[in-house]
Image (spheres, rainbow, N blue to C red):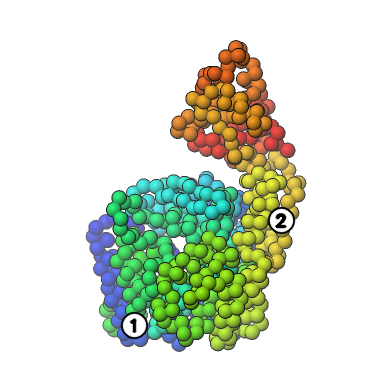
């Protein structure tokens, strides 16, 4: 989605013109394959680093456009959400010290970004999913105000014809309906690119699918979303559901999601893959195109294939085939989109080397993957890896293999041979692949987050734990150490000044609630059983309607008749509420002024928590 001058595919004439260019682009691509026009004698690598922006409280900071103006470097660009930016690294030939050069450029650009960010009071953080993201940050107020993102959101929501539904079950559950594509912005990746010879594209692509599950299992770094512990790599489920435009139907029929792993092994050529994607996924965005790609290809010139590239940018395969031009020569590459951002740049470079080494080290026996494994098994491996990470048991070439066994005893030696074949610096091979081996043995990004979050929640409320976890991620990233060396978070009470905390950090979210039609006897029993002094009251639609407090009930007349009355008859109806992003100091002042010992915390009229005087340190 790097195109600036795009629009939703509404106008019939513009749409038809674009589709004609799209069809001719495919014809031109096939002709270029026949004429062997592709740069097949060089292998290059490249990467895209997605970054989260956080403020001084480690919460999302939606100032990407201001930051990009301050950085003023073409390597940096926007993302869907205003609290994300992206760095596009320069492609390098796969040989020698290419990974050290990639690391050097990435760290230099991050340093440049941090210096500009410091001037704006924000920080750069690498995370598969930023722990402190909340419901507010997936609203359209945080959509980057650029035409292409507005067009993408508009056309996808119109295509869906209703809310996007999120249903992710892990240790916890997340069930939500959402009216925009902004949940996609929760996903932050380190996207890898590998140039592939046109003559070997299908075998390489099928191999990239086969190894996706095992590679992902030791790279997971997104185990939580909005405080819920879900999949080891929650991005996989979240990305598909947040852009799933398929309509629910009473008719049983197969529909392909725009985000997905695929349903079968690929055959033919890369053009065959593009043809299937165009056939299955309607054109969402268009742009004005002057080029006659087929005429250029016939003349032996290199076309841009602008229509094909724009459409391909709206089909989100986890392994995406790509067409590009470098130095005036056309090339093909595979973009690996399932690797998360972080936990550290060393971890990311290790992931990169591991994947590239496996791609280049493919044994001859695996040239024909359809003859080796059933595709459904490969797809199941990928989903299992996203769910269970390095605890996954894989079906691999007819055997059941643990992630640790498969990665350590088969895939790492294979990756080493692949990198050696490309004459990558031996010291880089050893150091980077050793990080993968250590993660398989000890801890990955997801296990570090989960273990520390569970410990933190024993000492403080969920929101505060998420802030402390995010701060620890940031602090550890500054050390440059890979995640298998990260220590446990210090769970002692933070000594920062409490007046700068938000209500969300200390409020109680696991609530006991009453309905307006319940009896006071039930309310009194619930208070006694759970040793609480206040209970909020809701109606059938989940709207806050009142509050019951023990002191209020004790002050009412006719105490003998009180238990038989409805809650709605005796509840406090004029209830003062607050919001999750209110300062704790302000909430305390409100309670003092109103004389209440608690404040319900609401969002759009619905209860999301409650804060009491005893919660305030």
Task: Judge whether 97 appears above or below 538 on screen.
Answer: below
Q: Quadrant of residue 402?
A: bottom right
Q: Residue at x 69, y 36 (%)?
A: 615
In this view, the mark in front (2 or 1): 2
Residue at 63% over, 56% down: 450
Residue 77 visible somewhere in the drawing: no
Q: Residue 291's spot in the image, x, y percent?
A: 30, 72
State which quadrant residue 616 falls in.
Answer: top right
Single out the residue that lies furthest toward the front: 399
In the image, residue 146 sits, relative to residue 414, either above or below, namely above
Q: Which residue is mark 2?
A: 489
Residue 539 x, y percent position in the rendering: 48, 29
- Extreme top residue here? 558
Residue 554 lies, in percent from the top left, at 65, 18
Q: Identify the residue shown where x is 30% and y is 74%.
A: 26
The quadrant of the image that shows the N terminus is: bottom left
Q: Earlier in the sequence, mark 2 or mark 1?
A: 1
Q: Is residue 358 left or right of residue 330?
A: right
Q: Is residue 590 above or below residue 195?
A: above
Query: Which of 488 and 15 lies nearest the eye of the viewer?
Result: 488
Label 1 secondary element: helix
Identify the disc placed on residue 77.
Answer: none
Element at label 2: loop
Residue 33: assigned label: 1
Question: Image quadrant for the C terminus?
Answer: top right
Viewer-side residue, 519 vs 434: 519
- Residue sitting at 66 percent across and 44 percent down? 461
């Amino acid at each position: 989605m790097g195109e600036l001058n795009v629009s939703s595919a509404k106008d019939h004439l513009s749409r038809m013109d674009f589709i004609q260019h799209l069809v001719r682009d495919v014809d031109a691509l096939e002709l270029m394959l026949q004429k062997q026009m592709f740069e097949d004698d060089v292998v290059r690598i490249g990467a895209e680093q997605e970054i989260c922006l956080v403020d001084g409280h480690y919460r999302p900071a939606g100032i990407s456009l201001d930051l990009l103006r301050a950085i003023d470097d073409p390597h940096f660009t926007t993302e869907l959400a205003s609290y994300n930016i992206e760095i596009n690294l320069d492609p390098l030939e796969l040989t020698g010290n290419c990974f050290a050069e990639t690391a050097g450029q990435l760290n230099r650009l991050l340093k440049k970004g941090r210096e500009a960010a410091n001037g704006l009071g924000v920080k750069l953080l690498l995370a598969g999913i930023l722990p402190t993201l909340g419901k507010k940050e997936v609203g359209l107020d945080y959509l980057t105000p650029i035409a292409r993102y507005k067009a993408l959101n508009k056309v996808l929501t119109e295509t869906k014809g209703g809310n996007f539904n999120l249903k992710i079950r892990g240790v916890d559950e997340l069930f939500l309906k959402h009216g925009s594509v902004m949940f996609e912005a929760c996903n932050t990746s380190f996207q890898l690119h590998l140039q592939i010879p046109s003559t070997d594209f299908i075998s390489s692509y099928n191999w990239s699918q086969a190894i996706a599950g095992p590679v992902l299992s030791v790279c997971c770094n997104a185990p939580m979303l909005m405080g819920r512990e879900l999949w080891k790599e929650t991005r996989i489920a979240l990305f598909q559901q947040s852009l799933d435009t398929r309509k629910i139907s009473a008719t049983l029929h197969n529909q392909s999601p725009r985000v997905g792993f695929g349903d079968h092994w690929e055959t033919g050529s890369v053009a065959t893959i593009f043809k299937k994607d165009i056939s299955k996924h309607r054109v969402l965005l268009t742009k004005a195109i002057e080029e006659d790609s087929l005429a250029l290809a016939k003349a032996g010139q290199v076309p841009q294939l602008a229509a094909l590239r724009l459409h391909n940018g709206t089909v989100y395969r986890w392994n995406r085939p790509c067409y590009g031009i470098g130095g005036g020569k056309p090339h093909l590459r595979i973009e690996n989109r399932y690797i998360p951002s972080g936990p550290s740049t060393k971890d990311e470079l290790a992931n990169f080397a591991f994947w590239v080494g496996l791609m280049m080290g493919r044994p001859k026996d695996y040239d024909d993957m359809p003859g080796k494994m059933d595709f459904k098994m490969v797809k199941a491996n990928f989903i299992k890896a996203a769910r269970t990470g390095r605890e996954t048991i894989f079906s691999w070439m007819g055997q059941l293999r643990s992630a640790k066994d498969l990665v350590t005893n088969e895939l790492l030696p294979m990756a080493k041979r692949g990198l050696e074949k490309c004459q990558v610096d031996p010291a880089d091979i050893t150091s980077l692949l050793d990080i993968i081996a250590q993660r398989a043995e000890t801890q990955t990004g997801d296990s570090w987050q989960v273990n520390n979050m569970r410990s933190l929640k024993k000492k403080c409320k969920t929101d505060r734990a998420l802030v402390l976890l995010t701060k620890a991620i940031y602090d550890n990233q500054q050390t440059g150490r890979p995640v298998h060396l990260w220590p446990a978070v210090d769970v002692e009470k933070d000594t920062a000044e409490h007046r700068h905390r938000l209500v969300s950090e200390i409020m109680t979210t696991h609530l006991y609630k009453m309905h307006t039609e319940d009896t006071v006897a039930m309310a009194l029993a619930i208070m006694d059983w759970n040793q609480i002094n206040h209970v909020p009251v809701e109606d059938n639609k989940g709207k806050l309607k009142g509050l019951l407090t023990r002191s209020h009930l004790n002050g009412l007349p006719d105490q003998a008749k009180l238990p038989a009355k409805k809650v709605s008859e005796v509840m406090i109806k004029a209830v003062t509420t607050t919001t999750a992003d209110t300062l704790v100091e302000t909430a305390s002042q409100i309670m003092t002024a109103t004389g209440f010992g608690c404040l319900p915390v609401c969002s759009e009229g619905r209860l999301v928590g409650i804060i009491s005087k005893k919660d305030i340190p």
